Image (cartoon, rainbow, N blue to C red):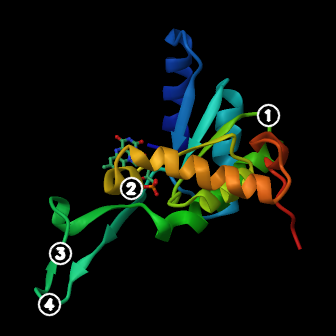
Amino acid sequence: MGYDPDVSERLLKRVRKVITVPMGVKLPPYFDPAHHEVMGNVIGRCNVDFLNMINSVGNGLVIDPERETVVIKPKGGFGGLGGRIIKPVALANVHAFYKLFQGKIPIIGTGGVVEGVDAFEHCLCGASAVQIGTVLVEEGLDVFGRLEMELAAILKRKGYNSIAECRGQLKEL
Ligand SMILES: Cc1cc2nc3c(=O)[nH]c(=O)nc-3n(C[C@H](O)[C@H](O)[C@H](O)COP(=O)(O)O)c2cc1C
């Protein structure tokens, strides 16, 4: 649905009418600035309170060359990709939407957060918070304490007092 702007807009406007809590939208990854702009316009018309991006990168195929089989089931081996491999796509989407909305809609950065530095990079791109998926499954609840410590150490080393200070501060060359 996130790849169909008309359907997305109809749904968001209907949901907006009945929702009584802040309304967040989780977006799939987009791969072209034209798509960021189209969905940005939809979101701008739907009174969205916060965004979360990205959902997994859809329909990857992981195979086992020894057994010559797919690894994931069902769907014939097709499955959503997460973890380190998707971080550049996630950062690109966070930064694109941060710039589109000039930082006015808070973004939860999701995708490829495995270490504290990944969370820091999401903040530089404009994230106000981060979400984790793959590494939570792999490591369990202890991951939250580890990431918090690693991120705090990076902020301290770089002289930032808070996440807010580095949010969206990514420099372009
Ligand atoms: C086991 C698992 C279940 C997931 N279920 C959902 C879901 O129900 N809804 C959703 O929006 N994203 C779901 N995701 C995607 C994650 O929220 C996240 O967007 C994606 O995995 C990228 O983050 P990561 O690199 O930290 O894994 C799931 C991810 C995993 C690993």
Q: What residue does disc 3 label? A: 70
Name the one closer to the observer, 65 or 149.
Answer: 149
Residue at 65% in and 35% down: 43
Q: Does the beta carbon of the residue at mark 3 sit less than 8 Å from ligand 1?
A: no
| Distance of label 4 from label 1 (alpha carbons) | 50 Å
Q: What residue does disc 1 label? A: 104
| Distance of label 2 from label 1 (alpha carbons) | 28 Å
Residue type pointed to by label 1: Lys
Residue at 56% in and 17% down: 16
Badge 2 or badge 3: first in the primary sequence:
3
Badge 2 or badge 1: first in the primary sequence:
1
Q: What residue does disc 2 label? A: 134
31 w.r.t. 100: above or below: below
| Distance of label 2 from label 3 (alpha carbons) | 19 Å
Q: Residues within 10 Å of mark 4 (few under 14, many from 20)?
A: few
| Distance of label 3 from label 1 (alpha carbons) | 43 Å
Q: Is residue 114 visible?
A: yes
Q: Is residue 111 left or right of residue 79?
A: right
Nearer the camera: disc 2 or disc 1:
2
Badge 4 or badge 1: first in the primary sequence:
4
Give coordinates of residue 39: x percent, y percent: 63, 44
Residue type pointed to by label 3: Val
Q: Secondary structure at mark 3?
A: strand
Q: Does the beta carbon of the residue at mark 2 sit less than 8 Å from ligand 1?
A: yes
Which quarter of the image is occupied by the C terminus? bottom right
